[in-house]
Amino acid sequence: MKKTLFVLFAVIGFSGTAVCQGSEVAHDYAQGDLVLLTGFETAYFAQKESLVKDENGLISGNILTKFPSGKLEETGSLLKGQRHGAWFKYNEKGLLLTEAHFYNGQKDGIWKIWDENGTLRLQLSYDKGKRVGSWTIFDESGNVTSIENY
């Protein structure tokens, strides 16, 4: 699924952090997988020197989002406007909810999804956007309830 990411650069000379507003960031569900990756974010923060805009206006760099409370919500990297590499999403308690990997905007590698209590609930595998390997579902106690092979 393509995501639209609107980024406004901070005024030149703004020290330490570039603040960018997400004007249209919607829920990003894995198609058919019922995996919530991210919700609505109000602001993106990145070290000013880590964001690069190329000649086509595509952004590369390290991104992080924060809850209104200021606590870390999500971290990851963009490469030419696409998610690339590892992305991590946390709840307000600071527990890891999602570890997701991308290659040029496509789901790639092992994905892990935890519930709000920190129990691993899903382990998935992708190869450049395609489901591969074993997908494992765990119950609220962490016991395997099913395995689907692709």
Image (spheres, rainbow, N blue to C red):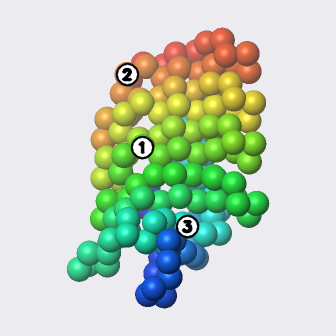
Q: Which residue is mark 1?
A: 86
Q: Nearer the viewer, mark 1 or mark 2?
A: 1
- Where residue 133 is drawn, which disc sits there? 2
Q: Which residue is mark 3?
A: 44
Give the Cα separation between the discs numbered 1 and 2.
19 Å
Horizontally, residue 34 falls left or right of residue 150, namely: right
The amino acid beneath tag 1 is Ala
User: Residue at the location (63% across, 64% down)?
Assistant: 41
Instruction: Give the class, few, some or many, for how many residues have Cα within 10 Å of label 3's Cα (few <14, many ≥20).
Output: many
- Residue 22 image point, x, y percent: 56, 72
Decide: is 3 above or below 56.
above
> Which residue lies most toward the left here?
55
Decide: is 102 above or below 25.
above
Decide: is 94 above or below 68.
above
Query: Is residue 81 shown to the viewer in this render?
Result: no
User: Residue at the location (53% across, 58% down)?
Assistant: 64
Question: Where's the C terminus, which quadrant?
Answer: top left
Instruction: Give the class, few, some or many, for how many residues have Cα within 10 Å of label 1's Cα (few <14, many ≥20).
Output: some
User: Residue at the location (30% across, 65% down)?
Assistant: 80
| For the residues bearing labels 1 and 2, Cβ distance under 8 angstroms | no
Viewer-proximal residue among 84 and 146: 84
The amino acid beneath tag 3 is Tyr
Viewer-proximal residue among 91 and 148: 91
Q: Nearer the viewer, mark 2 or mark 3?
A: 3
| For the residues bearing labels 1 and 3, Cβ distance under 8 angstroms | no
